[in-house]
Image (cartoon, helix red, strand yellow):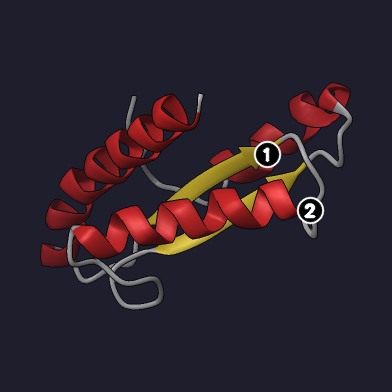
């Protein structure tokens, strides 16, 4: 399971990095949207955020310079996802699918 999570984070980082190359030319800092099921201060949430940052660092990207993180946390209540998702979509001009 750890391997699949790591692979997912690296894949997400690579996809975001491809979009960032275009955005750099436009001089804007693209967001990476994270919709998490846990609490903002949970160990698993911090681990997830650290994994994203580590994957981006491998690609030579730094938060605050090349991208920004926009995270919303459901606090272990997945019924909150429908309310949280639109707030994330509002932070980006584009969505990478």
Tag of residue 54: none
Tag of residue 42: 2
Residue 17 is situated, as x and y percent measured from the top left of the image, at: 22, 50
- Residue 58 found in image quarter: bottom left
For label 2, the crowd category at 10 Å Cα-Cα, with few meaning under 14, some 14 to 19 and many 20 or more, is few
Q: Nearer the viewer, residue 63 or 26?
A: 63
Residue at point 63% right, 38% down? 35
**12 left or right of 17 in image:** right
**67 left or right of 17 in image:** right
**25 left or right of 64 in image:** left
Residue at point 41% right, 25% down? 4
Examine the rendered structure and indicate whether residue 27 appears above or below residue 39.
below
- Residue 46 found in image quarter: bottom right
Mark 2–mark 1 contact, CB under 8 Å?
no
Residue at point 51% right, 23% down? 1
Of the 4 image quadrants, the one containing the C terminus is top left
For label 1, the crowd category at 10 Å Cα-Cα, with few meaning under 14, some 14 to 19 and many 20 or more, is many
Mark 1, residue position:
36
């Amino acid at each position: 399971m750890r391997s699949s999570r790591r692979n997912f984070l690296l894949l997400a980082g690579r996809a975001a990095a491809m979009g960032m190359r275009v955005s750099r030319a436009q001089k804007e800092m693209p967001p990476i949207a994270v919709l998490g099921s846990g609490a903002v201060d949970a160990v698993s949430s911090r681990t997830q955020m650290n994994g994203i940052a580590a994957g981006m660092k491998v690609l030579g990207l730094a938060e605050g310079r090349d991208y920004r993180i926009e995270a919303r946390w459901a606090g272990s209540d997945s019924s909150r996802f429908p309310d949280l998702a639109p707030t994330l979509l509002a932070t980006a001009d584009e969505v990478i699918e």
